[in-house]
Image (cartoon, rainbow, N blue to C red):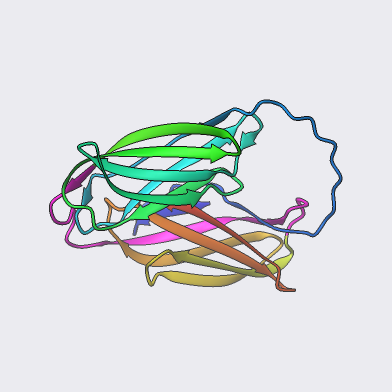
């Protein structure tokens, strides 16, 4: 789970399950059906002109979450200002980070593609002149959860690493019996989105990773 809180406040939590891969060979008989695809998108904000803009969302198909190619276009008054191509991960999550947009109203257009199937989503985005906040706030981030192999069995012991991406805020700790808990002291802007990156390494060097996008409150 992840908690972002101002110091001396009660945390809120979101469950994290982390998996490390095991090598296996599986033979499947497959029936092919017509594919359906859907995509969600969230632009967040408002942002300042000096802010990093994080566009997030999920891609799903009729079997659940879905890996897919995602194109993110940002337009102002109908004119394309910037675009990025990213990939949704195995859980269907995707994100794209933009910087350098001037102030004004924007439209974010998302196109997800899987094989010959596409899905679209759009959202609005506001960038204000200057910064939204001139100083960061002290937060204590608590991350806790359970580390599992892909078979579902607990990782008996290892090390968990937590980092707020593109910042100096990071920490690591050892754990046992699959359960981990780790804290990060940080100074964050309430109006910003951040990416918390987690990785777990077991005692023989096998590694698994996960990440979540959050806004401190």
Q: In which quarter of the image is residue 50?
A: bottom left
Q: In the depicted view, which residue is nearer to us: 32 or 197?
A: 32
Q: Is residue 55 visible?
A: yes
Q: In the depicted view, which residue is nearer to us: 210 or 54?
A: 54
Residue 77's spot in the image, x, y percent? 20, 37
Q: Does the magenta stretch include residue 70?
A: no
Residue at left offset 61%, top offset 47%: 90
Residue at left offset 13%, top offset 52%: 129
- Tell whether 61 sits left or right of 44: right
Residue 72's spot in the image, x, y percent? 39, 45
Q: Does the magenta stretch include residue 148?
A: yes
Residue 168's spot in the image, x, y percent? 38, 72
Q: Quadrant of residue 27?
A: top right
Residue 75's spot in the image, x, y percent? 27, 41
23 vs 32: above or below: below
Identity of the residue furthest to the left in this view: 129
Residue at left offset 80%, top offset 34%: 30
20 vs 87: above or below: below
Q: Can residue 13 be seen in this view?
A: no
Residue at left offset 40%, top offset 54%: 4
How many marks the image carries: the answer is 0
- Tell whether 145 sits left or right of 30: left
Q: In the depicted view, which residue is nearer to us: 193 or 126?
A: 126
Q: In the depicted view, which residue is nearer to us: 196 or 7?
A: 196
116 vs 53: above or below: above
Query: What residue range appears in magenta?
Result: 126-154
207 vs 37: above or below: below
Q: Quadrant of residue 120?
A: top left
């Amino acid at each position: 789970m992840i908690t972002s809180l101002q110091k001396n406040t009660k945390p809120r939590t979101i469950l994290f399950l982390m998996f490390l891969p095991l090598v296996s060979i599986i033979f499947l008989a497959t029936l092919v059906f017509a594919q359906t695809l859907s995509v969600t998108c969230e632009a967040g904000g408002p942002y300042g002109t000096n802010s990093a803009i994080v566009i997030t969302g999920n891609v799903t198909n009729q079997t659940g979450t879905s890996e897919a190619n995602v194109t993110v276009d940002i337009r102002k008054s109908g004119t394309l200002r910037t675009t990025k191509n990213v990939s949704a991960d195995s859980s269907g999550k995707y994100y794209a980070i933009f910087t350098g947009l001037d102030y004004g109203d924007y439209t974010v257009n998302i196109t997800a593609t899987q094989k010959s199937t596409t899905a679209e989503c759009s959202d609005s985005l506001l960038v204000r002149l200057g910064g939204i906040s001139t100083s960061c706030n002290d937060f204590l981030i608590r991350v806790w959860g359970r580390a599992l192999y892909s078979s579902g069995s607990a990782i008996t012991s290892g090390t968990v690493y937590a980092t707020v991406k593109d910042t100096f805020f990071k920490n690591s700790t050892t754990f046992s019996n699959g359960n981990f808990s780790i804290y990060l002291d940080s100074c964050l802007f309430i109006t910003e989105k951040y990416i918390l990156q987690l990785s777990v390494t077991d005692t023989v060097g096998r590694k698994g990773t996960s990440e979540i996008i959050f806004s401190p409150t």
